[in-house]
């Protein structure tokens, strides 16, 4: 499949939000959970599953399942190596900052455990999760192709329910294991849902989610109520009724909110996209979304450096630095764009695959 402008733009938007959430800045309070219980990682993981199906299913049809599996594993290796690089940088930063943490006290052990995906103490927790999900992609897509989507759905739903009761959480019995913020058993639901919708779109080009004004109205009402509840402390001085917490694993309201927001965004007509394409800010977000792995890596490096410096600056300087940080995300995207263009000019496209695919990052 060709690139989808809305998907790339949303990925860029989520990348900006995640960047702002990874270091102290004046805009963070306006960008984290602004629309309710769901946040940028929810959409980012869902779109990662969607794009994975879009990229790898056509390859399976053209070259066979073994070629698809090989490409998935190569991509998984790339993401894993990015994770290792961020671990190394994180340990170096921790040692230089003099902070008291597991990484500072046991750098070698932290590196080994981080390499095994058993110690995720830094900001880059989404990459280990993505490695696991992407490695499972050939199995999931195979089951979809064999008509066993119901089985995948049952397993995914079962894991999500089990996560609500603690499956996949850290345990005090093994204190040296830190699985991070993202419970794999809970978050796989987003990725698998995205993969299923991506599979249906590739498998049947005329597939479309039911467009119902009644369902849209219900989603708007539910999303609005959840947004009000999330901000109830600020609005009325009362804590949220549904127990809002930034930790994503044990609150079904978060998954419900994410589903409602996704339907609202999907319901918007494509004519809206054509109008937004002319606006510079959306062109910027689209650029970021087309090079999401490179932008994410760069944002993590910037966030680590600014987490220890920005707090000492006055408010005006913090705001300027924050805006410059967001704009700087275009640098890795432009560099990677030029790199891909140079490679494309040297290597002719393979027969049968002469279209620009979505990046699976």
Image: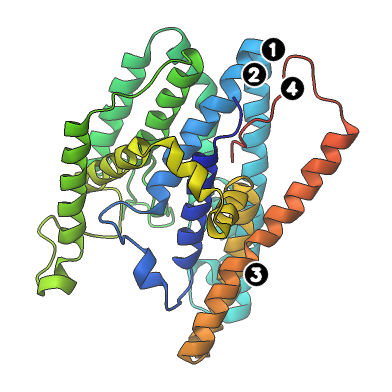
User: Alpha-carbon distance for marks 3 and 2?
Assistant: 40 Å
Dot 3 corresponds to which residue? 92
**Closer to us: mark 3 or mark 2?**
2
Disc 1 is placed on an element classified as helix
**Percent position of residue 8, x then y:** 54, 43
User: Alpha-carbon distance for marks 2 and 4?
Assistant: 12 Å
Residue 326 quadrant: bottom right
User: Alpha-carbon distance for marks 3 and 1?
Assistant: 43 Å
Dot 4 corresponds to which residue? 354
Q: Residue at x 43, y 53 (%)?
A: 177
Q: Which mark is residue 318?
A: none
Disc 3 is placed on an element classified as helix
Dot 2 corresponds to which residue? 59
**Percent position of residue 151, x then y:** 33, 15
Instruction: First in sequence, mark 2 or 4: give its number.
Output: 2
**Closer to us: mark 3 or mark 1?**
1
Residue 265 quadrant: top left
Q: Residues within 10 Å of mark 2 (few under 14, many from 20)?
A: some
């Amino acid at each position: 499949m060709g690139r989808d402008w809305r998907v790339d733009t949303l990925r860029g938007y989520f990348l900006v939000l995640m960047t702002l959430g990874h270091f102290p800045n004046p805009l963070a309070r306006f960008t984290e959970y602004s629309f309710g219980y769901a946040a940028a990682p929810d959409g980012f993981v869902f779109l990662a599953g969607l794009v994975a199906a879009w990229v790898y299913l056509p390859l399976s049809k053209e070259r066979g399942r073994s070629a698809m599996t090989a490409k998935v594993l190569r991509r998984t290796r790339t993401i894993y190596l990015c994770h290792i690089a961020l671990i190394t940088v994180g340990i170096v930063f921790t040692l230089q900052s003099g902070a008291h943490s597991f990484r500072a006290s046991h750098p070698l052990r932290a590196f080994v455990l981080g390499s095994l995906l058993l110690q995720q103490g830094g900001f880059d927790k989404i990459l280990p999760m993505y490695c696991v999900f992407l490695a499972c992609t050939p199995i999931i897509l195979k089951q979809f192709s064999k008509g066993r989507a119901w089985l995948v759905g049952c397993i995914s739903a079962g894991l999500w329910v089990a996560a609500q009761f603690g499956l996949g959480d850290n345990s005090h019995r093994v204190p040296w294991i830190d699985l991070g913020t993202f419970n794999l058993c809970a978050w796989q639901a987003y990725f698998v849902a995205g993969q299923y919708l991506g599979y249906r779109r590739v498998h049947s080009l005329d597939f479309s989610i039911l467009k119902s004004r009644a369902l849209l109205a219900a989603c708007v009402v539910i999303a609005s109520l959840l947004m009000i509840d999330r901000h109830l402390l600020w609005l009325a001085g009362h804590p949220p009724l549904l127990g809002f917490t930034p930790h994503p694993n044990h609150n079904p309201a978060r998954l419900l909110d994410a589903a409602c927001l996704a339907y609202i965004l999907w319901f918007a007509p494509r004519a809206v996209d054509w109008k937004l394409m002319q606006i510079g800010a959306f062109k910027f977000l689209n650029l970021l979304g087309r090079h999401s792995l490179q932008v994410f890596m760069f944002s993590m490096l910037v966030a680590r450096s600014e987490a220890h410096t920005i707090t000492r600056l006055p408010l005006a300087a913090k705001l300027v630095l924050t805006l410059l940080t967001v704009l700087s995300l275009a640098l890795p995207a432009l560099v990677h764009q030029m790199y891909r263009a140079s490679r494309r000019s040297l290597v002719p496209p393979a027969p049968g695959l002469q279209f620009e695919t979505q990046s699976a990052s």
